[in-house]
Image (cartoon, rainbow, N blue to C red):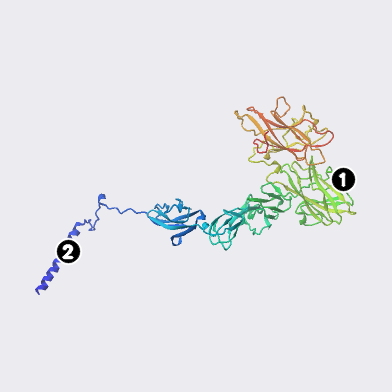
């Protein structure tokens, strides 16, 4: 009993002491008014910061040919000369991973900081790579089989070369490829006897070897606009991809299709069907206005070059009515064909593609003399001054049994546009394309029966349409860069002074007035010169055309020179007339170039060949505030008693983008 009381007394004492301690601790922690405990603030000088993070390198591994080295031993042959090793470093992102390479025996091999190992002699060395506190080592065993093996074996390389012509088994041989033009190298083809290959290096087997360099054709981009490929002389599948559009958005004739082809592939293309209101003109190959193929023929064949190349199918607005006269004189009978509808029919005949012309009855045996002076179609809407060279499309259909040869033409002051002699057999339909050069203005035209041996009348249908040959501008007026055209007052034919008289139809020497086409800085003049025309001009009393220049550059006192570059084009294309033309082109201070002191610059033009082109330059000292005129002077007749074709175009610019070459 006494022992139990003593034990109980001891336990109670311990519990009381523990509670006392808890009470003291609780009393030492501050409380807010609500009874919650408040964490005391620790002064800065008593705070303990955690240790800074340490960036580490975890491992370094030496690699050869991007692979870890099996068993830590790398065996190579001294004949390899140099090999390359790398180090794979595993580390924290901001740890310094710079690698230091070393070789334990630099007599056997040395190693650069970049890992290039130079093999010096047979033996062993330890290659090590260290980054941070980590390192890795491998044993490099250098063999010298060249000194140990026997017979050398021949090496043949097709499409390249080897650094040696023969080698012993175990030696390393380095290849170099010789890539042919228009080819890409794809790799080497080795015989099965070669078991070790690394890029352009292989280990020689104990036999002769023949190695082949393999190539594939380089492919070049071909763009086809307004057409599709119908045949390609290549094994490559010529599938194209849509390359977008130019000019008219989704209009089919401007759709671009891109292809890839090897060099010198023969390509056949076919233009799309002619869009409504348009006619196929021709093909531009490589660059715009670089006309190729046959005019009006919608198929074309060419070979691909070794660069990106574009071929365009060109379409122009179709003029369906060129012939405006009621009929043709000098034939037995003619009746109008209107928009493809022939006389007596209720609907248009699709053969004539909506064009206008005539149904012509040609008498048995009727023929027309050679030449182009019989203008028996007294009305046309053929105008190549405003649009430049035009493509003419004629369709002939012989409704009879007899064969007939005919020709339709326009002869305009020495400019000849002719279908040439077209022979149409009985029952045959023939389509012919020809061109009408620049400078023609609504002439009377001619239709001639060149040969008709039929004993009966021949009923021939003939229609004629036209379009602009170069929709982006006539090729003859092409310039390079950004032209600064010379502009003359008024773009109509009603202003030019003719011998001082501004009336365009005054009979004062020029049979046809001048025309201005200021959009391309050009002046067109069509005239027949013969005895009695031009008022019998002389050097002292020439006939002339003149007009004010309205866009002279601002006067610059430090550089007062006036300079105009020009191109003269002889438009005469008729071999039946003289095409010799002598002119003087001048810059003058008055409308009358013959006034005293008026001429400040001049150049003489002497042209005697069809289609001749000459470049010229007019340069003078400008006077501030002075206005200037451009004038064309005719100082003499080029022939007496015969016709001369003075049909020409003059194009002028301020900057030399026209092709003039300085002396």
If you read the primary sequence from the N terminus, does the residue marked by circle 2 or circle 1 appear first?
Answer: 2
Seen as rendered, the residue at the extreme top is 596
Seen as rendered, the residue at the extreme left is 2
* Residue 320 image position (x, y, % from top left): 75, 50
- 78 displayed left or right of 585: left
- Pointer 2 with pointer 1, Cβ within 8 A: no
Residue 586, by quadrant, is top right
Secondary element under disc 1, as helix, strand or loop, is: loop
Seen as rendered, the residue at the extreme bottom is 1
Q: Which quadrant would the C terminus be assigned to in this image?
A: top right
> Which residue is labeled 2 in the image?
19
Query: How crowded is the residue under tag 1: few (<14 C-alpha within 10 Å), some, or many (20+)?
Result: few
Q: Closer to the camera, 285 or 332?
A: 285
Residue 559's disc number: none
Q: CA distance from mark 2 to mark 1?
A: 146 Å
Residue 609, by quadrant, is top right
Q: Closer to the camera, 459 or 119?
A: 119
Q: Closer to the camera, 140 or 61?
A: 140
Secondary element under disc 2, as helix, strand or loop, is: helix
Q: Is residue 489 visible?
A: no
> Which residue is labeled 1 in the image?
369
Query: How crowded is the residue under tag 2: few (<14 C-alpha within 10 Å), some, or many (20+)?
Result: few
* Residue 448 image position (x, y, % from top left): 84, 47
* Residue 603 image position (x, y, % from top left): 72, 31
Q: Is residue 246 visible?
A: yes
Establish if 159 lies above or below 663.
below
Q: Closer to the camera, 248 or 15?
A: 15
Mark count: 2
- 421 displayed left or right of 263: right
Q: Which quadrant would the N terminus be assigned to in this image?
A: bottom left
* Residue 472 image position (x, y, % from top left): 67, 45
Residue at left 77%, top 43%?
A: 442
């Amino acid at each position: 009993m006494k022992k139990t009381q003593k034990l109980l007394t001891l336990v109670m004492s311990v519990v009381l002491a523990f509670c006392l301690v808890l009470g003291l601790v609780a009393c030492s922690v501050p409380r807010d008014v609500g009874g919650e405990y408040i964490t005391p603030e620790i002064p800065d000088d008593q705070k303990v910061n955690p240790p800074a993070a340490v960036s580490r390198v975890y491992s370094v591994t030496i690699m050869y040919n991007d692979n870890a080295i099996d068993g830590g031993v790398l065996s190579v042959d001294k004949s390899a000369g140099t090999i390359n090793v790398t180090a794979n470093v595993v580390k924290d992102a901001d740890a310094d991973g710079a690698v230091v390479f070393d070789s334990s025996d630099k007599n056997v091999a040395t190693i650069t900081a970049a890992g290039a190992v130079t093999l010096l002699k047979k033996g062993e060395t330890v290659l090590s790579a260290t980054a941070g506190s980590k390192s890795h080592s491998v044993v490099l065993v250098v063999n010298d089989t060249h000194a140990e093996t026997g017979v050398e074996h021949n090496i043949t390389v097709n499409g390249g070369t080897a650094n040696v012509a023969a080698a012993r088994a175990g030696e390393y041989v380095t290849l170099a490829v010789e890539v042919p033009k228009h080819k890409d190298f794809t790799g080497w083809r080795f015989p099965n006897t070669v078991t070790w290959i690394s890029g352009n290096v292989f280990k020689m087997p104990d036999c002769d070897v023949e190695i082949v360099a393999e190539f594939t054709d380089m492919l070049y981009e071909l763009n086809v606009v307004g057409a599709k490929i119908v045949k390609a002389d290549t094994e490559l599948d010529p599938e194209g991809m849509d390359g977008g559009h130019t000019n008219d958005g989704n209009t089919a004739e401007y759709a671009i299709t891109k292809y890839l082809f090897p060099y010198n592939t023969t390509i056949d293309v076919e233009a799309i069907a002619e869009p409504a209101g348009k006619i196929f003109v021709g093909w531009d190959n490589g660059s715009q206005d670089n006309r190729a193929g046959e005019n009006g023929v919608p198929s074309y064949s060419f070979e691909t070059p070794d660069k990106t190349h574009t071929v365009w199918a060109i379409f122009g607005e179709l003029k369906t009515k060129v012939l405006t006269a009621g009929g043709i004189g000098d034939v037995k009978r003619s009746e109008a064909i209107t928009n493809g509808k022939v006389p007596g029919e209720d609907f248009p005949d699709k053969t004539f593609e909506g064009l206008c012309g005539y149904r012509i009855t040609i008498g048995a045996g009727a023929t027309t003399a050679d030449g182009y002076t019989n203008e028996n179609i007294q009305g046309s809407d053929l105008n190549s001054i405003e649009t430049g060279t035009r493509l003419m499309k004629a369709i002939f259909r012989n409704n009879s049994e007899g064969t007939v040869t005919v020709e339709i033409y326009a002869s305009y002051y020495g400019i000849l546009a002719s279908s040439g002699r077209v022979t149409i057999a009985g029952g045959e339909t023939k389509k012919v394309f020809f061109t009408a050069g620049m400078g023609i203005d609504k002439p009377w035209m001619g239709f001639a029966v060149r040969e008709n041996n039929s004993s009966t009348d021949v009923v021939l249908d003939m229609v004629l349409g036209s379009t602009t040959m170069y929709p982006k501008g006539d090729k003859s007026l092409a310039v390079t860069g950004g032209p600064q055209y010379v502009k003359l007052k008024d773009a109509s034919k009603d202003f030019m002074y003719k011998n001082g008289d501004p009336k365009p139809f005054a009979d004062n020497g020029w049979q046809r007035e001048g025309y201005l086409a200021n959009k391309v800085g050009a002046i067109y003049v069509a005239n027949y010169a013969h005895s009695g025309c031009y008022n019998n001009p002389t050097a002292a009393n020439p006939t002339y055309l003149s007009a004010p220049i309205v866009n002279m550059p601002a006067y610059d006192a430090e550089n007062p020179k006036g300079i105009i570059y020009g191109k003269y084009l002889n438009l005469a294309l008729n071999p039946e007339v003289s095409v010799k033309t002598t002119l003087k082109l001048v810059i003058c201070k008055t409308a009358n170039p013959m006034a005293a002191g008026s001429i400040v610059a001049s150049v003489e033009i002497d042209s005697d060949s069809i289609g001749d082109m000459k470049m010229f330059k007019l340069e003078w000292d400008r006077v501030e505030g002075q206005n200037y005129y451009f004038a064309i002077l005719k100082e003499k007749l080029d022939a007496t008693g015969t016709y001369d074709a003075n049909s020409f175009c003059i194009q002028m610019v301020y900057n030399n983008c026209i092709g003039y070459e300085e002396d």
